Image: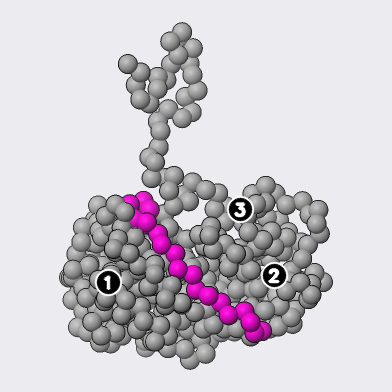
Amino acid sequence: MVHPNGSPNGTNGVTKDRSKLIPFSSRLKEGRALAQDVWSIFNAANLPADCINLGQGYMNFAPPEWIKDAANDALNTVAASHYSHPKGRPRLRQALKKYYDPKFGRDLDIEQEILVTSGANEGQYSVFVAFLEEGDEVIMFEPFFDQYLPSVTFNGGKPVYVPLHPDVSHGKITSNDWVIDFDELRRAISPRTKMIIVNTPHNPVGKVFTRAELEGIAALAEEFNLLVMSDEVYESLTFDDKEHVRIANLPGMWDRTVTVGSAGKMFNATGYRVGWLIGPASIIQPTLAATTRIVFCSNSPLQEAAAAGLEQVVDRKFFEQQRKEYNERRQILIDCFDDIGLKYTRPEGSYFILLDISEVTWPENYPFPESVKGRGRDFLACWYIALEFGVSSIPVSEFYCEEHVNIGERFARFAFCKDVATLKQAAERLRELKRIVNKTSA
Ligand SMILES: Cc1ncc(COP(=O)(O)O)c(C=O)c1O
């Protein structure tokens, strides 16, 4: 009998191709895990060396000194050089409690209701491991943070997409003009729906969900008994006095909500890979079982640094200062887009701004690489802008299912988590877009 994986050697003794002897798991064929994703297409290696990277959402500046000092101190201790408890280091869980007790209006139990994870990403993955059965449906609003998709499908879940609808009828739209159609949301719920993911402040729209919107989602979650994963990694980054509302704080919602946070986003330290989950024991304890099998525990020294961060943020008024700095960064791109005369979505949270590129044009015979041909119009626009104007951005259709690509392909996402000098230089280059804007094509 022929072995199902095939024989590595031909019967005549001639060695066959040995480069793919072992078939990989079929789960990798789901959730776009193997597709050439937007990050590898718009990667520095594929773009001109002097291209300014406003594509990827990581900072080009360091975490604050006092957090780096805490990281260094931790590296010099024996205890923090070894395993932590899978729940997270007690100092960090205490610091999370101190910071979040007033925000949730609760006396959080650091043994049962707080779990430290290896970045928000791994925390979310662990929730999916802990709660999804094969075929369970997970509702996500589009555009969605792209990691949700493979994290859901790897665990047998089925993504169900509900687009936020931008009102592009007027010139000055804000992230608040991207709205939920609640009838559409209700129609998306089936007997297999297990979970809904909310992301506020939102990547990439910058939307800060209103209390009324969250109440609408909460009512459906209650009616259909859904688990709510509230991804709040940008919670400290809201603008224009916009209030960050926690869905977990709405009546009855604590028991069905897990809130996700990230030290990487809070402290400009995305490489530290420290995040957390906060919720009722009924959600956190199964998730602890999952995370213990996935990573066992998160890296110890940088948990200490995150703890030092949370212990001091309030006294240092760190987030107030950070908001001011990000406000200035946001304004540089807003002024630039106003100058060019292109529409954009004014973000009320997070550090992304969506430029409406529907009026951007390029020569018909422009030599686009195969990787962007056949994708949304935004892939072409972003490629052209990166190559000809020296600023990279991310095509937003990547964050939609195929059926809804037409909504996303109108936009390019620019990240403003970069220093002022870089953003000013990028703005100077982008102002040249004036030359190729076709005002009649909108
Ligand atoms: C909405 C959203 N959730 C989660 C994450 C992941 O956070 P972390 O770096 O802590 O894993 C990101 C990172 O970009 C994000 O934008």
Q: Earlier in the sequence, mark 1 or mark 3?
A: 3
- Nearest the viewer among 317 and 258 is 258
Please tell me how crowded label 2 is: few (under 14), some (14-19), or many (20+) other residues with Cα within 10 Å.
many
The mark lying in front, picked from 2 and 3, is: 2
- The earlier-in-sequence mark between 2 and 3 is 3
Amino acid tagged 3: Ile
- Distance (Cα) linking label 2 and label 3: 21 Å
Q: State which quadrant residue 73 falls in.
A: bottom left
**Which of the pair 28/80 is nearer the observer?**
28
Q: Determine the residue located farthest toward the bottom in the rendered image.
A: 241
Kind of element beneath mark 3: helix
Residue 216: x percent and y percent? 36, 81
* Residue visible at 55% across and 49% down in the picture: 36
Query: Which sits in the foreground, 137 or 397?
Result: 137
Q: Which residue is mark 1?
A: 224
Label drawn at residue 41: 3
Give the residue pinned by disc 2: 358
Amino acid on which disc 2 is placed:
Ser
Task: Inspect this view and state whether residue 235 appears.
Answer: yes
Write the start and end of the magenta stretch as one range: 152-171
- Answer few, some or many: residues within 10 Å of disc 1's Cα (few below 14, many 20 plus, some between 14 and 19): some
